[in-house]
Image (cartoon, grey):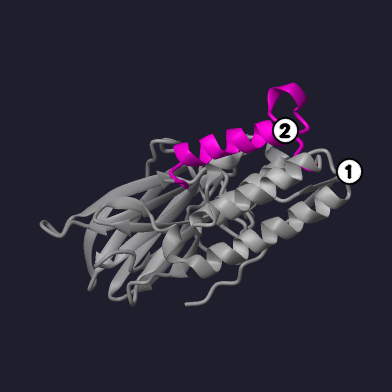
Amino acid sequence: MTISLRRFRTVHGARVRALALGALGFALALGPATTAAAAVEVAHAHGVRAVFTYRGSYPAGHGLELTIERSGVVVYHGPVRSAWCGDACWPNLVAGQSSALRVVRLDAGVDVLLSLYTGGAHCCVVEQVYAASPTTGRYVVHERDFGDAAVRLVASSVPGEVDLLSADDAFAYAFTDYAASGLPIEIIRFVGGHFVNVTRSFPTLVARDASQWLADFRSQASSHYTDTVGLAAAWAADEATLGHWAVAKRFLDQQARAGHLNSALGPYEPSGARFVGALERFLRERHYLG
């Protein structure tokens, strides 16, 4: 499986919003639901067929239900609920995707992946995995809140399986406002009922993400833009993931001395050398550093 990594930018005055995934853009598309009739999405693969139905109009749906069939036999049927949006979620569609429902191999078996949107200006994408228990065969739902970050599929290092390609939403607002924050790439694997960070297993994608963030930062720094720390943080996180923190820190120290590390939030968020120190502490807390 291949994936095209793209960056979406929104220009607001002089500001270029480089919100990212490093390489991903978030695009919410309204589903085919109407207030009168139920909308239906169907996905099938590997002998498993899933049917997702819902009613209502954006941003809050109702009557969300999921049915899973295996070899023509119904093995799961029930309402769709989430800890983050109850039973009023909305199907989430990322760019280029016509359905919020997919049947994939995330773990050893065949899983149903349902992408939901909680509503709100900056939140949230919730991915639900319906996986069959290895002991009982019954489907159990597991979910993870990805925040503002979109989620795509990328081929796993495990043959025949896929992982979830997204970004670390903890970087939103961490050092500057939302529009100027950068989100470093994050890749999540669903294993044994748990969502596990496996970003370090994809150095090529991480390096590509870092290169894009650095190009954006250099462009803004050369024009003396007053809000560059968000991009620098995303780049440094990628470099730390690659094991290059010492080199990244030397570069950041140089940029601090040159006056290129600035936050538009002034006294509320650190700039210059203070930013470098705050970023290092943040990366340790987020397990980017040992």
Residue 216, image quadrant: bottom right
Residue 219, image quadrant: bottom right
> At label 1, which amino acid type do we have?
Gly
Q: Secondary structure at mark 2?
A: loop
> Can residue 82 be found in the magenta stretch?
no
Q: Is residue 63 visible?
A: yes
> Can residue 279 be found in the magenta stretch?
yes
Calculate the distance from the C-alpha at mark 2 to the C-alpha at mark 1. 22 Å
Q: Earlier in the sequence, mark 2 or mark 1?
A: 1
Above or below for 203 versus 146: below
63 lies left or right of 69? right
Q: Which residue has dot 1 on it?
A: 13
Above or below for 31 versus 284: below
Of residue 75 and residue 117, the one placed in the foreground of this image is: 117
> At label 2, which amino acid type do we have?
Ser
Q: Residue furthest left?
A: 135
Q: Which residue has dot 2 on it?
A: 271
- Please give the count of numbered marks on the rendered protein: 2
Report x, y in % for residue 68. 29, 61
The magenta segment is: 260-289
Q: Residue at x 47, y 68 (%)?
A: 154
For residue 62, the mark is: none
Report x, y in % for residue 224. 87, 44
Q: Secondary structure at mark 1?
A: loop
Q: Is residue 19 visible?
A: no
Q: Residue furthest top?
A: 267
Above or below for 174 versus 6: above
Report x, y in % for residue 144. 40, 46
Mark in front: 2 vs 1 = 2
